[in-house]
Amino acid sequence: MQPINIFAKWQVKEGELDTVLNLISQVAEQSRAEDGNLLYIINQSTTDPNTLLLAEAYQDEAALDAHRASAHFQKIVVGQIVPLLDTREVVITREISRV
């Protein structure tokens, strides 16, 4: 089975970037330690610092489900980060071919 890839675009509310970056660094560290995590990268736009792009990969849907149910995801992402975002767009994908 192919890994599950997640691409998320977060637009951080004005004045909240430092808080979000501090919180997401905690999430990244804990997420990378999860058994099914293959990748967790945080990118910041070069033209708009309040735009963050996350790239994540999990070995399968069960690993993604475990990540989303984890205490750190629920407490930090859902409970603390999401209220500090203007928008949050998440796309879940599977690779269809290698070029």
Image (spheres, helix red, strand yellow):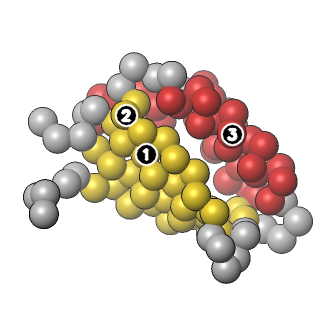
The numbered mark, 2 or 1, whose residue comes first in the sequence reads: 2
Residue 77 visible to the viewer: yes
Secondary element at tag 1: strand
Residue most toward the bottom?
Answer: 47
Please say if 71 is above or below 78.
above
Q: Rounded to the nearest whole Å, what is the CA distance between mark 1 and mark 3?
A: 14 Å
Image coordinates of residue 13 in percent, x first then y, are 78, 68
Badge 3 is on which residue? Answer: 25
What type is the residue that disc 1 sits on? Answer: Glu
Q: Locate residue 49, reporting x and y percent.
A: 73, 70
Specify whether 38 is left or right of 16. Answer: left
Q: How far across and how far down the image is residue 69, in percent?
A: 49, 30
Q: Which residue is mark 2?
A: 38
Q: Is residue 86 in sight in this rendering?
A: no
Q: Amino acid at mark 2?
A: Leu
According to the image, label 1 marks what residue? Answer: 56
**In the visual, does 54 lie left or right of 95?**
right
Q: Are marks 2 and 1 in contact (CB under 8 Å)?
A: no
